[in-house]
Image: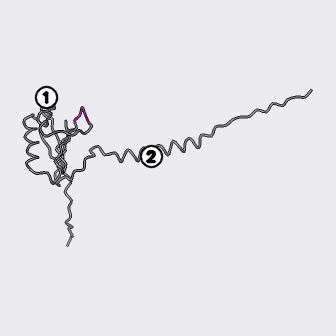
Amino acid sequence: MSIKRRSKHISVFSMASMTDVIFLLLIFFMVVSTLVVPNAIKVNLPSSQSTATTQEPVARITIDAEGYYYISTESAPEVTMLPVEELEARLYEIGAAHDEEEDPYVVLYADKSVSYGEIVKVLNASATAGLRMILATEALQDNSTERDV
C-alpha cells in the first residue's frame, strides 16, 4: 500500500503590481483633471488693472468672436448656446430666482473683437432684469522695467 504525500501549496497574491497600477491610475486622473477647463469657449478678454470679486456670480454670459451667446448658471452649470432674443427673458428668470440674495451679479466674458453694441445689449438686458453686470478681463501685463539710479 502506498502512502500519498500531501503537499500544501500556499498561493500568494502579490499586491505590488496592483499598487503600481492603482498609482499610475491616480497620476493619470490627477493630470487629466487639471486639463479640464470650466469655460471651454475660446475668448480673448481685454486687459484691466482691477481684479476684485467677492462672491460667486449667479450666471456667466460669454460672447465669442463670431457673435454667439453662451450662458451658464448656478443651477445649470453646463454652457448652453442662447439666441440674443432669449437673453433678456433668461436673465429676468435668473433675477427673479435670486431676489433674496444681497447683490446678485452676472459676469460677461466678451471677446476683444465683439462690437460695443453687442455688449450694450447684454448690459441693458441685465439692468432690466435687476442684475448687476461685471465685465471679465485679463490682468494687465506690466512691460515697463524700472531701474534704480
When the figure is inspected, residue 3 is found, relative to residue 49, above or below; the finding is above
Q: Nearer the viewer, residue 111 or 131?
A: 111
Q: Which residue is mark 1?
A: 96
In the rendering, at what x and y percent does residue 76 appear? 25, 33
Disc 1 crowd rating (10 Å Cα; few below 14, some 14-19, many 20+) is: few
Q: Give the magenta part as a residue range.
A: 73-77
| Kind of element beneath mark 1 | helix
Q: Quadrant of residue 68?
A: top left
In the rendering, at what x and y percent does residue 11 appear? 69, 35
Count every numbered label the image shows and give the total. Answer: 2
Residues under labels 1 and 2: Cα distance? Answer: 43 Å
| Kind of element beneath mark 2 | helix
Q: Residue at x 20, y 67 (%)?
A: 146
Q: Which residue is mark 2?
A: 28
Q: Quadrant of residue 15?
A: top right
When the figure is inspected, residue 103 is found, relative to residue 114, above or below; the finding is above
Q: Quadrant of residue 145?
A: bottom left
Which sits earlier in the primary sequence, circle 1 or circle 2? Answer: 2
In the rendering, at what x and y percent does residue 60 appear? 20, 40
